[in-house]
């Protein structure tokens, strides 16, 4: 009877966990509903240029860079004995407040700076909620991995909910642009965020049966110091450090042309907003299909091979964009709208395809106790890399001379973008291979990974002047040397 009760409690906890994660990822996925309208509101309502649009899009993601801090606080600071659900509720509340303010703001006082501040508040709430959601996925996923459940199942479940909400949000957003005033759309999402706040606040965290830290809840300041120490130790592991470094570089070195392409499609090609909405719907459906395919088939493929294949595929799609701008597809009879819906929609989410297998890899490598901190650090690195990518895209468009009225240099800019996308493939060996090789093979493979990087780190150590940073990098080299017995001479 005890075992049956324990099994029943376990199933009940899994059901509540899936409910919380399903709601959380669904609301976060549905954020594209108001954001689709924001792009047209900035372009048509406030008359901003392509570069200003792209700068605002990426600058409002700055709160995402603070995810490691939110993760440290979530891991260490308990609110009434809980350290996940209260932060999800807080994030939902901040989002609700920001979108209500945008919706109810009188048109006479609406400006780009005011809108930017409120969008920053919305993304701050989203970042806090995402950190707590990701930590629950990592903690519950680790328990499932140690049990009988397959690795990556919970990650795929969360992705499916987020992708389905994204598809619905983009579809409704593309239609609502022509049917409803922007204020109504912003208000609707505010109501959804408020509903998430009320539901999450009513669920006790003990119902999720998450693993508890040894020693219980400790002093907040000592807890944060311990989390910083544990995160530091995790990042000293070469397989974690180099994996995150490659993942961030694979985004940061690509000068994305999102704002420029948005203006090219809506202003130069005069495509209807519903076409762009359908494009994003197709992309979200592709994400949903990818999460299912990954869970059933591709999770058995070594992460390094999978990420390299996805990076190469992204470059091929960008080369296809160059042909599209050149008019090739139009000349062979493919309408512009069809290309944007299918090819552009898929290309936009191919960058997201890399996140799922990499998150599963990090969940496997993550030491127990700092799941929230490490996953938050990963998402922060991704957010910062995406911001850098957006700024580089603005610089590239300005250098080549692409503007809202002149797209003659767009083909050249897209070719540069594709070439930069291929660059990270030279460093793909930074990603660990198969996680289940023989010990000797694993040791030999690790030596290959890090011997090629040793000269780069040594150069950084010699070049950096502050003694504290120099000591940190030197200690990191010693850790790698003693861990893998690599002869650096």
Image (cartoon, helix red, strand yellow):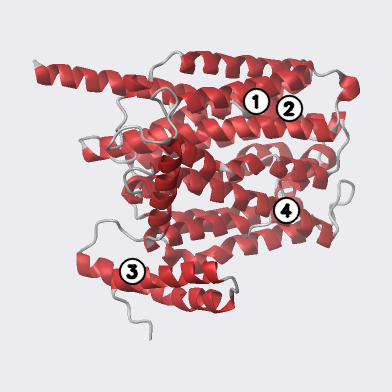
Disc 3 secondary structure class: helix
Sequence order check: which comes first, mark 4 or mark 3? 4
The residue positioned 60% from the left and 30% from the top of the image is 125
Labelled disc at residue 446: 3
Please identify the quadrant where the N terminus is shown.
top left
Q: Find disc 4 in the rendering and name its residue.
A: 391
Could you say where residue 131 lies in the image, as x and y percent from the top left?
49, 36
Q: Which of marks 1 and 3 is in front?
A: 3
**Marks 2 and 1 close (CB-CB < 8 Å):** yes
Disc 1 secondary structure class: helix
Could you say where residue 59 lies in the image, as x and y percent from the top left?
71, 44
Q: Residues within 10 Å of mark 2 (few under 14, many from 20)?
A: many
Sequence order check: which comes first, mark 1 or mark 4? 1
Q: Nearer the viewer, mark 4 or mark 2?
A: 4
Sequence order check: which comes first, mark 3 or mark 2? 2
Residue 195 or 431: which is nearer the viewer?
195
Q: Find disc 2 in the rendering and name its residue.
A: 37
Please identify the quadrant where the C terminus is shown.
bottom left
**For the residues marked 2 and 1, what is the alpha-carbon distance in whole angstroms?**
7 Å
């Amino acid at each position: 009877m005890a075992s049956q009760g324990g099994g029943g409690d376990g199933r009940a906890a899994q059901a509540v966990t899936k409910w919380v994660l399903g709601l959380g990822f669904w609301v976060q996925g549905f954020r594209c509903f108001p954001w689709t309208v924001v792009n047209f509101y900035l372009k048509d309502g406030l008359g901003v240029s392509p570069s200003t649009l792209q700068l605002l899009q990426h600058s409002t993601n700055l709160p995402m860079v603070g995810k490691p801090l939110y993760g440290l606080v979530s891991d260490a600071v308990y609110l009434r004995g809980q350290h996940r659900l209260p932060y999800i509720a807080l994030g939902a509340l901040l989002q609700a407040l920001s979108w209500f303010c945008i919706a109810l703001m009188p048109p006479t006082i609406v400006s780009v700076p005011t809108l930017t501040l409120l969008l920053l508040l919305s993304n701050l709430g989203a970042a806090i909620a995402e950190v707590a959601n990701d930590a629950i996925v990592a903690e519950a996923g680790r328990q499932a991995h140690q049990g009988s459940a397959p690795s990556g199942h919970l990650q795929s479940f969360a992705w499916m909910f987020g992708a389905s909400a994204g598809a619905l949000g983009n579809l409704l957003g593309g239609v609502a642009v022509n049917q409803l005033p922007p204020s109504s759309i912003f208000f609707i999402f505010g109501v959804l965020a408020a509903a998430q706040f009320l539901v999450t606040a009513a669920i006790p965290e003990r119902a999720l049966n998450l693993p508890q830290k040894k020693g219980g809840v400790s002093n907040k300041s000592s807890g944060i110091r311990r989390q910083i120490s544990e995160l530091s130790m995790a990042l000293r592991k070469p397989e974690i450090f180099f994996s995150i470094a490659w993942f961030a570089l694979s985004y940061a070195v690509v000068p994305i042309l999102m704002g420029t392409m948005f203006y090219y499609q809506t202003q130069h090609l005069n495509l209807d907003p519903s076409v762009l909405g359908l494009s994003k719907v197709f992309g979200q459906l592709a994400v949903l299909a990818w999460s299912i395919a990954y869970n059933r088939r591709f999770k058995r493929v070594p992460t390094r091979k999978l990420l390299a294949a996805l990076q190469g595929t992204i470059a091929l799609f960008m080369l296809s964009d160059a042909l599209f701008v050149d008019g090739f597809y139009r000349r062979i009879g493919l309408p512009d709208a069809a290309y944007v819906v299918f090819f552009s929609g898929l290309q936009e989410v191919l960058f997201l395809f890399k996140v799922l297998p990499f998150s599963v890899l990090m969940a496997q490598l993550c030491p127990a106790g700092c799941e929230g901190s490490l996953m938050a650090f990963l998402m922060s690195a991704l957010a910062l890399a995406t911001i850098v990518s957006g700024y580089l895209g603005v610089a590239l468009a300005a250098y080549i001379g692409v503007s809202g009225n002149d797209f003659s240099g767009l083909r050249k800019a897209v070719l540069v973008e594709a070439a930069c996308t291929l660059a990270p493939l030279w460093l793909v060996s930074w990603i660990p291979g198969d996680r289940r090789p023989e010990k000797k093979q694993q040791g030999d493979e690790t030596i290959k990974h890090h011997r090629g990087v040793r000269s780069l780190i040594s150069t950084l150590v010699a070049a950096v002047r502050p003694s504290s940073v120099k000591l940190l990098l030197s200690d990191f080299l010693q850790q790698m040397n003693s861990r893998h017995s690599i002869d650096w001479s």
